[in-house]
Amino acid sequence: MEAGFTHSASLPDVLGGSGASLLVSTYQAGQLVAVGVDDGKVAFDFHRFDQAMGVAVGQDRLAVGAKGQVWFLDDHSELAPQLEPAGHFDRCFLARSSMVTGGIQIHEMAWGVDAEGQPDLWIVNTLFSCLVGLDPAYSFVPRWRPPFISRLAGEDRCHLNGMAMRDGAPAFVTVMARSDTPGGWRENKLTTGTVLHVPSGEVVTTGISMPHSPRWYDGQLFVLDSGMGHLQRVDVQSGRREMVAALPGYARGLAIHDGLAYVGLSKIRETAVFGGVPIAEFHDQLKCGIGVIELATGNTVATLEFTSGLEEIFDVQVVPDSRCVALGSAPGDGDEIWLVPAPR
């Protein structure tokens, strides 16, 4: 995929200094984008996953939520030195399997830890207003839903969309509204956004304009007020929120690493979903890309803007201990990395 971009002069040093690269998903373009650094320059690798949304980064495995299924990519970084151009990549993840869920509108996903200490994938099932797991015998396995959701129904009642993990399990989620009617969150979405505690379902804070991407980091809760374009810090005791930074886009997708917040930014479409949000007043000025915020100061220390090819971003995730990541895409899209047994 061809995409135009520009970035701040500081971005290569910021990424290189953090010892990490980024994965960025875009539903609109059906791409998972690896953003890294090679020879002091920002490097991109675009890979097709139809309707790519939530991305979960594990110790040796990635999961990508896509159209009707979840893809699993295993770590095969032993192949990285063999890939062209020579020396470009230092990590490699290849698609090895997928599990069909059907069109449950997968939003965020994250790896947790089960009772036996094994990796455990949690998925935000937006269509059915619940958090779920996977099992080969079923489309999904319901695990938790907000207490105001009276029954399991594929009706997107509250637009549950984001999930924050703490100690290996979900601790907070975001909903557009506390609605128990089909599509009821759409009625007054500008002021009804809420962060809920898991498992109690109690309200942590409310009155947010279309919240996304709650994250627990260093003993603090952060959330994106997407309709305002703000990164906010939440006092979980009082529910009060303070703005950490304002950004020039619809804020959605958040990764925090080494004191830096990587915030996904999107342009907005003039549709019933986005119409009327506060940031729409600046429609012509909004950018698609990533803003890098220093949490201690709220300062923007680096930026990336896609000037063509991409207009929205859904998720942003950090791949620690990496400089430049190679990905194997869905089979048949023409850019596979082949994995075969060594010759005998």
Image (cartoon, rainbow, N blue to C red):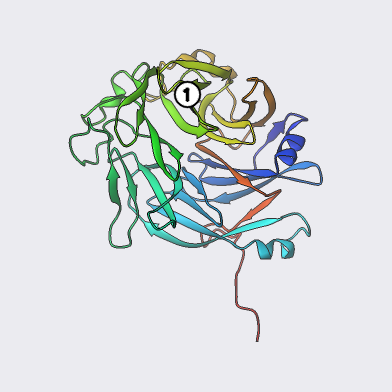
Please indicate whether residue 61 sits to the left or right of residue 155 in the image: right
Identify residue for label 1.
Answer: 226
Q: Residue furthest right?
A: 39
- 256 sits left or right of 21 in the view: left
Dot 1, how many residues are within 10 Å of its Cα: few (below 14), some (14-19), or many (20+)? many
Viewer-proximal residue, 341 or 186?
341
As drawn, is 71 to the left or to the right of 259? left
Task: Measuring from the top left, give residue 208's x and y in whole percent.
Answer: 40, 19
Position of 320 relative to 139 (above/below)? above
Residue closer to the observer: 299 or 96: 299
The residue depicted at 64 percent of the width and 79 percent of the height is 342
From this view, report whether residue 293 is shown above or below residue 53. above
Tally the marks.
1
In terms of depth relative to the viewer, which is nearer, 80 or 144?
A: 144
* Quadrant in which residue 148 is drawn: top left
In percent of width and height, residue 195 lies at 38, 26
**Residue beneath the point at 44% across and 56% down:** 117
Q: Residue at x 53, y 58 (%)?
A: 73
Residue at (50% x, 12% y) in the render: 281
Asked which quadrant contains residue 170, the reply is top left
Residue 113 percent across, percent down from the top left: 43, 51
**Where, quadrant-wise, is the C terminus in this rendering?**
bottom right
Q: Secondary structure at mark 1?
A: loop
Q: Amino acid at mark 1?
A: Ser
Quadrant for residue 157, please give it: top left
